């Protein structure tokens, strides 16, 4: 079978398009990630802002679901302002993302390594918190809240400030959560919540 110069030219162009498309996608997600890293830290590990979670190593499912919740407004983001920037929140940021953007970012951060933060903690409270976790949280946040394969947020090693804010929002009803989670959370006393936070903070 003989091919004309036009056939060969067309084949080459098609091949170049197929190669260029993934490269463009990589370039796009890298640029988006740079913006996300301004708050969440390089590679998704929060280093400067203790009220912002590390998202490196979360499962792609968790990140995608969370971004979609922010995008639809089902989950409210706290207001945040860089020293030299404008005030924003996760709702505004997520609204600007397409479905393809969200999937790309989810895959990107799922491929990063989560680095637990080293913080001081109350050893006595940690023991109590470990029991609370085993009783109320281990089923969905297994291995002490470190297993991303649960398709749930990594809790162990997060900043104390972030954990305290989220627990407070859950307790006050400011933040929604799955019914099965709220059913157990609502049964926790203030002392148990504080102990639970110490347990997660201690996992370094």
Image (tube, helix red, strand yellow):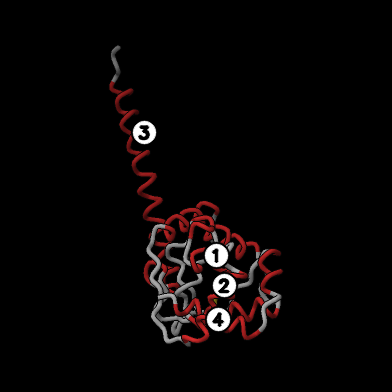
Residue situated in front as seen by the camera: 119 or 20:
119
Query: Judging from the image, what secondary structure is the residue with disc 4 in?
Result: helix
Crowding near the residue tagged with mark 4, few <14, some 14–19, many ≥20 C-alpha atoms within 10 Å:
some
Point out residue 191 in the picture as x, y percentages from the top left corner. Answer: 62, 86
Disc 1/disc 3 C-alpha distance (Å): 46 Å
Q: Earlier in the sequence, mark 3 or mark 2?
A: 3
Quarter placement of the C terminus: bottom left
Point out residue 145 in the picture as x, y percentages from the top left corner. Answer: 51, 68
On residue 14, the disc is 3
Visible residue check, residue 125 = yes
Disc 1/disc 4 C-alpha distance (Å): 17 Å
Visible residue check, residue 87 = no
Point out residue 112 in the picture as x, y percentages from the top left corner. Answer: 38, 61
Q: Is residue 91 above or below residue 120?
A: above
Question: Are the residues flagged by discs 1 and 2 in contact, CB closer than 8 Å?
Answer: yes
Crowding near the residue tagged with mark 3, few <14, some 14–19, many ≥20 C-alpha atoms within 10 Å:
few
Disc 2: which residue: 133
Disc 4: which residue: 128
């Amino acid at each position: 079978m003989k091919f004309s110069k036009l056939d060969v030219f067309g084949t080459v162009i098609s091949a170049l398009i197929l190669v260029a498309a993934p490269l463009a996608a990589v370039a796009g997600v890298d640029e988006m990630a740079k913006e996300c890293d301004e708050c969440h830290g390089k590679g998704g590990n929060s280093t400067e802002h203790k009220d912002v979670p590390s998202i490196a190593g979360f499962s792609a499912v968790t990140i995608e679901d969370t971004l979609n919740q922010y995008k639809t407004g089902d989950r409210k983001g706290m207001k945040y302002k860089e020293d030299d920037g404008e005030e924003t929140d996760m709702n505004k940021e997520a609204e600007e993302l397409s479905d393809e953007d969200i999937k790309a970012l989810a895959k990107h951060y799922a491929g990063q390594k989560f680095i637990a933060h080293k913080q001081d903690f109350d050893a006595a409270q940690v023991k109590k918190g470990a029991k609370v976790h085993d009783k109320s949280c281990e089923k969905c946040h297994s291995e002490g809240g470190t297993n991303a394969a649960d398709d749930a947020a990594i809790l162990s090693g997060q900043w104390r400030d972030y954990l305290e804010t989220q627990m407070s929002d859950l307790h006050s009803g400011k933040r929604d959560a799955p019914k099965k989670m709220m059913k157990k959370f609502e049964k926790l006393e203030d002392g148990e919540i504080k102990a639970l936070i110490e347990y997660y903070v201690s996992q370094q």
